Image (tube, helix red, strand yellow):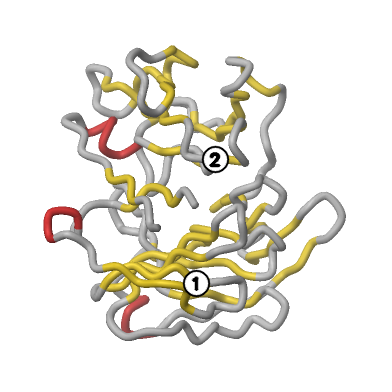
Amino acid sequence: MVHEVVHEAASRCEANTVSISPDGKRVVWVQDSTDNANGVLLIATVGEKGATTLAEGISCLGARPLRWKGDDLLMVQRKNRQSVLYDVAANKQVVGDPGQETKRCWSADGAWLAAESDGKPYVSDTTDLRQYTYTPPEQEATKWGGWEARSVSTDGRYVAVGWIGTDPSRRDGSFAVVDTETSKVVDLPGTGEVRSILFSADGTVLLRRGTGITVLDREFKPLGTVTEPAPTRNRALLAYVP
């Protein structure tokens, strides 16, 4: 079964930051401040009332201002644009900046990082670093401010890539999968516009097209497809919980 989590927030900061942990148990968001650019970082358990404050002065701007590193670590940006990691389980900041890379994204289990260094995209775990190349469709690329990895497979073999908007607002979608070993684009099954690709911790892949949502196995073979209800089709897909 496909479990779809969509955001419906009233404020700019909340709508641009609300995010679900990869295991589907926690939800985090930045609560608006007076400037609509920074606020208080809050965390809650899905299905329970109340929220806990993790930090203040957290930026809510950017394509994806909150990024999970596994189920317990969360990367955020302070209003001075310094990136910091928080251990949400222990409710404390992890010492040190996670690195000087840009366009960072972790696999659902937190083992692999996809990022860019000196303009070169790569994936890395604690022992291996693999650079890859990708050239997006030229006609589409002229409409955007570049691209970045949006989801990473748990073995680091594949990344789903999405466009970066020219304004500082949320971007969750992705449109292609790149093999980081060969730099080739994966041929995804089905028809219709690809809107989002999510790699899950159990190895399955959630493929969202204009025609519906399909769960794929590790080899990108379809396991099942559902048609989205009309009210949710234009909302951001935040998480897939197997």
Q: In this view, does 111 lie above or below 21?
A: below
Circle 1 residue = 216
Q: Earlier in the sequence, mark 2 or mark 1?
A: 2
Q: What residue type is labelled 2?
A: Trp
Residue at 31% x, 22% y is 31
Distance (Cα) linking label 2 and label 1: 22 Å
Residue nearest the viewer, comparing 207 with 19: 207
Residue nearest the viewer, comparing 237 with 181: 237
Q: What residue type is labelled 1?
A: Leu
Q: In which quarter of the image is residue 175?
A: bottom left
The picture places residue 13, in percent across and down from the top left corner, at 28, 31
Residue at 61% x, 62% y is 203
The picture places residue 113, in percent across and down from the top left corner, at 67, 52
Eye-nearest disc, 2 or 1: 1
Task: State which quarter of the image contains the N terminus.
Answer: bottom left
**Label at residue 68:** 2
Residue neighbourhood size for the residue with mark 2, other residues' Cα within 10 Å, grouped as few (<14), some (14–19), many (≥20): many
